[in-house]
């Protein structure tokens, strides 16, 4: 009868659970148990070029201007795309990373696909319909971007002879 007790499933389960608990306790102890988030602050005094002490900090400005020229893209048909460059000017006093917020207009209804990339307009250049353009513009500088508009190969036949206006929303974010 003693041999039957030693091999009972309940006893094996209890022994296995105890061993697992011991391993868990040892593992957690080895990882460490003290964590802290420390922070400190100290008021600053800025000294100007004249030696005067000041604590005034002035924020920079961020502003973009896009040339408002109309870009005419004609004779589009399924499978064909056209590209044109446009200029973005950073009129602020801090550098800005450019991204495309949206390209609005009759693109879907007319079977058009539009995207923006850094210039020059070249076949195979990485472009985006929305998202970062991977271009940073210095303060008071300009950047040239490329707008590509194409007609999808599966454009609806109802798109024949239609015209569409597009609005490209460009955002500049301080890196």
Image (tube, rainbow, N blue to C red):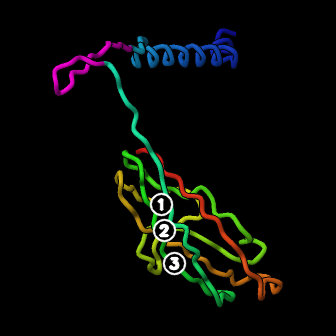
- Report which residue position mark 1 lands on: 133
Q: Earlier in the sequence, mark 3 or mark 2?
A: 3
Residue 134 point in image, percent of width and height: 43, 59
Q: CA distance from mark 3 to mark 2?
A: 10 Å
Q: Residue at x 51, y 78 (%)?
A: 84
- Report which residue position mark 3 lands on: 84
State left or right for residue 164 relative to residue 94.
right
Q: Earlier in the sequence, mark 3 or mark 1?
A: 3
**24 over 78 or under it: above or below:** above
Task: Determine the secondary structure under disc 1.
Answer: strand
Q: CA distance from mark 2 to mark 1?
A: 6 Å
Task: Determine the secondary structure under disc 3.
Answer: strand
Task: Determine the secondary structure under disc 2.
Answer: strand
Which of the 4 image quarters holds residue 141?
bottom left
Quarter placement of the C terminus? top left
Q: Residues within 10 Å of mark 3 (few under 14, many from 20)?
A: some
| Front one among 115 and 49 | 49
Q: Residues within 10 Å of mark 1 (few under 14, many from 20)?
A: some
State left or right for residue 156 relative to residue 173.
right
**168 over 2 or under it: above or below:** below
The stretch in magenta equals 39-54
- Report which residue position mark 2 lands on: 117
Residue 147's tag is none
Considering every residue shown, the one lying at the far right of the view is 158
Residue 159 point in image, percent of width and height: 78, 83
From the image, give the main secondary structure of the stretch colored magenta.
loop
State left or right for residue 141 relative to residue 48.
right
Asked whether the beta carbons under mark 3 and mark 1 sit within 8 Å of each other, the answer is no
Q: Earlier in the sequence, mark 2 or mark 1?
A: 2
Q: Residue at x 38, y 62 (%)?
A: 142
């Amino acid at each position: 009868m003693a041999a039957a007790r030693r091999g009972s499933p309940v006893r094996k389960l209890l022994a296995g659970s105890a061993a697992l608990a011991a391993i868990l306790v040892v593992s957690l102890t080895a990882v460490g148990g003290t964590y802290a988030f420390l922070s400190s602050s100290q008021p600053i005094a800025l000294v100007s070029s004249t030696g005067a002490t000041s604590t005034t900090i002035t924020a920079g400005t961020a502003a973009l201007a896009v040339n408002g020229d109309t870009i005419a893209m004609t004779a589009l048909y399924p499978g064909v795309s056209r590209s044109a460059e446009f200029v973005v000017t950073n009129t602020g006093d801090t550098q800005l990373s450019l991204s495309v917020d949206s390209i609005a207009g009759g693109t879907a209804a007319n079977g058009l696909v539009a995207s923006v990339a850094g210039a020059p307009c070249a076949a195979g250049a990485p472009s985006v319909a929305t998202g970062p353009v991977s271009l940073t513009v210095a303060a008071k500088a300009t950047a040239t971007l490329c707008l590509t508009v194409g007609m999808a190969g599966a454009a609806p036949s109802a798109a024949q002879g239609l015209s569409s206006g597009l609005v490209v929303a460009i955002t500049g974010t301080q890196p």
